[in-house]
Amino acid sequence: MKAPGHLNALRAFEASARHQSFAAAAAELNVTPAAVGQLVRTLEDWLGTPLFHRASSGRVRLVPTEAAERALPDLRAGFDRLTQALERLRQGSTRGVLTVTVSPAFAAKWLLPRLESFQSECPETDIRLDTSLKPVDFVAQRIDIGVRYGAGHWPGLQADKLFDEEVFPVCSPLLAQAPRRIQKPADLLRETLIHDLSMGVDEGFPTWDAWLRRAGVARTSPTARGLKINNSAAVLQAAIDGQGVALARSVMAQDDVASGRLVRLFPAIRMVSPLSYYVVYRADCAGLPRTQRFRAWLLQQGS
């Protein structure tokens, strides 16, 4: 014998039991309260037993019967298993959409200029970019894979190092070529220093003070003017536009330096960031074809 309404009736019952209300269940399921009530009544008719006691204490409240209460844990576990199975089916092919999370700056300055090569290798896979500076829930937001910048530890995710990174001063060619303007690191204290605030207060994120100490500059007073920006791509653009000297991250700045849009200052002074770029993904998705191919492509780009 087949249950009427199949999953719709069961979902209506589970949501109604959880909220103890047809109206609240309807809002969750994006249908009308009448439709939820009809689905539940149809299920009750097919089972030949009521699923709720209709209680009223100021407002109508649905109380699951004893039999319904016993069935709910198995029903919810079944929904969870079904969701996982559908997700595996969705991700288990190289065809379709691959959802990738990266920061807006990394997308603009590194990934998008190189993405055509992946699409040439895997034309059957479409990329959906999720660009955000905020942490994302890989399960809830159906993220397949991503690139994150940090110390390499994110709860619930596998992390493979993609790039180490240096930091160094950069400026526009016109500023770099101005006679007697920037000849030694201490000269930077007369310039507008552009600060990258994209990592907030992360203690490992290199700052101008740290670089100046590495260069042997005793900055006893903040004599330099400052421009503070919370987007690494905008930091570099401000330097390209001649608004000051930026402390650049090598991965972000490499194309601008290679093209001549920016000039690296004092290349003999090396400062490696304690933070790096990592390919991140859920362990249970590591063997899925689309994720596997994109991960391999990223690591090849970083080698």
Image (cartoon, rainbow, N blue to C red):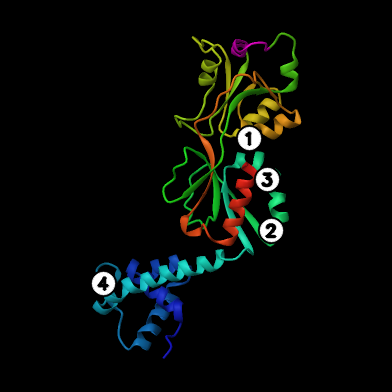
How far apart are the alpha carbons under marks 2 and 4?
59 Å
Q: Position of residue 223 (x, y in %)?
A: 55, 11
Labels 2 and 4: the sequence-earlier one: 4
Q: Which type of secondary structure does the marked residue at label 4 adopt?
A: strand
Q: Earlier in the sequence, mark 1 or mark 3?
A: 3
Which residue is the site of mark 2? 122
Residue at 57 percent across and 20 percent down: it is 226
Amino acid type shown at disc 2: Cys
Q: In 3D space, how far apart are the residues under numbered discs 2 and 3 (Cα atoms)?
A: 15 Å
The question of residue 178 being in magenta is answered with no
**Is 188 one of the magenta-colored residues?**
yes
Residue pointed to by mark 1:
252
Label 4 amino acid?
Ser
Q: Nearer the viewer, residue 16 or 91?
A: 91
Q: Quadrant of the C terminus?
A: top right
Looking at this view, name the residue that lies furthest to the bottom: 1
Name the front one of labels 2 and 4. 2
Residue under numbered circle 4: 56
Classed neighbour count for the residue bearing mark 2: other residues with Cα under 10 Å, few (<14), some (14–19), many (≥20): some
Q: Is residue 206 visible?
A: yes
Using the image, determine if residue 219 lies above or below residue 38: above
Relative vertical location of residue 16 with respect to residue 108 in this rendering, above or below: below
In primary-sequence order, the first of circles 2 and 3 is 3
- Circle nearer the viewer, 3 or 4: 3
Q: Are marks 2 and 4 in contact (CB under 8 Å)?
A: no
